[in-house]
């Protein structure tokens, strides 16, 4: 399964950064996104959790066999030059079923950082191995990578 998306505006990244597209991060919350890994030296944070939709009562309802994930770069003391971006590739593998996929997205980087968001990744239930390669293009390429595992129900 290959998905390629390009974010042309900072709007979606701003919503993610503001927490409007992510579920509440409470330990008891079944849809909370938690840290998967961090990539250095480019200050990348990868979070993932069960995908969710709003229920009739407005509370988040888990989406079976789907994962939500975000990859973000924190703000820096010196703003990146205009045209900077965060180029993210995610490879995932379900260790239970053997299913695999690759996700790609390019997000805008500004003075407040930047992020990419994958809201509904159909991984199937099981332990999902996640490998992320992210390059912050800030006048020169600053690559980083990390990996981790997340359970999906």
Image (cartoon, rainbow, N blue to C red):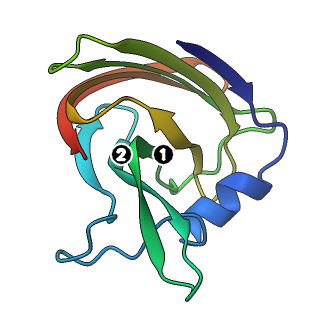
Q: Is residue 85 above or below residue 43?
A: above
82 relative to 29 in the view: left or right: right
Q: Which residue is mark 2?
A: 45
Q: Residue furthest bottom?
A: 57
Q: Residue visible at 57% across and 85% down?
A: 58
**Sequence-first disc among 1 and 2:** 2
Q: Is residue 138 visible?
A: no
Report if the CB atoms under discs 1 and 2 are less than 8 Å apart.
Answer: yes
Q: Position of residue 122 (x, y in %)?
A: 46, 32
Q: Quadrant of residue 44?
A: top left
Q: Residue at horizontal 55%, vertical 89%?
A: 57
Q: Is 84 or 95 nearer to us in this picture?
A: 95
Image height of 80 relative to 39, above or below: below
Label of residue 73 in the image: 1
- Where is residue 27, by image quadrant? bottom left
The foreground one among 42 and 77 is 42
**In the displayed structure, would residue 72 be above or below residue 15?**
above
**Element marked by disc 1:** strand
**Spot occupied by residue 125 in the image (x, y as percentages of width and height):** 26, 36
The answer for how far apart the CA atoms under marks 1 and 2 are is: 6 Å
Q: Is residue 46 left or right of residue 106?
A: left
Q: Secondary structure at mark 2?
A: strand
| Crowd tier of the residue under label 1, counting other residues whose Cα lies within 10 Å: few below 14, some 14–19, many 20 or above | many
- Given residues 144 and 92, the one toward you in this image is 92
The residue at the point 38 percent across, 29 percent down is 123
């Amino acid at each position: 399964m290959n998905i390629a998306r390009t974010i042309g505006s900072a709007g979606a990244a701003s919503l993610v950064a503001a927490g409007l597209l992510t579920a509440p991060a409470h330990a008891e919350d079944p849809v909370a996104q938690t840290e998967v890994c961090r990539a250095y030296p480019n200050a990348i944070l990868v979070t993932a959790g069960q995908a969710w939709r709003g229920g009739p009562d407005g509370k988040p309802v888990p989406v079976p066999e789907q994962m939500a994930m975000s990859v973000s770069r924190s703000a820096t003391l010196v703003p990146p030059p205009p045209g900077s971006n965060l180029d993210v590739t995610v490879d995932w593998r379900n260790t239970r079923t053997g299913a695999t996929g690759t996700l790609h997205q390019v997000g805008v980087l500004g003075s407040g950082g930047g992020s990419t968001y994958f809201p509904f990744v159909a991984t199937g239930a099981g332990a999902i191995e996640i490998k992320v390669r992210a390059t912050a293009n800030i006048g020169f390429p600053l690559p980083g990578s990390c990996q981790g595992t997340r359970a999906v129900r």
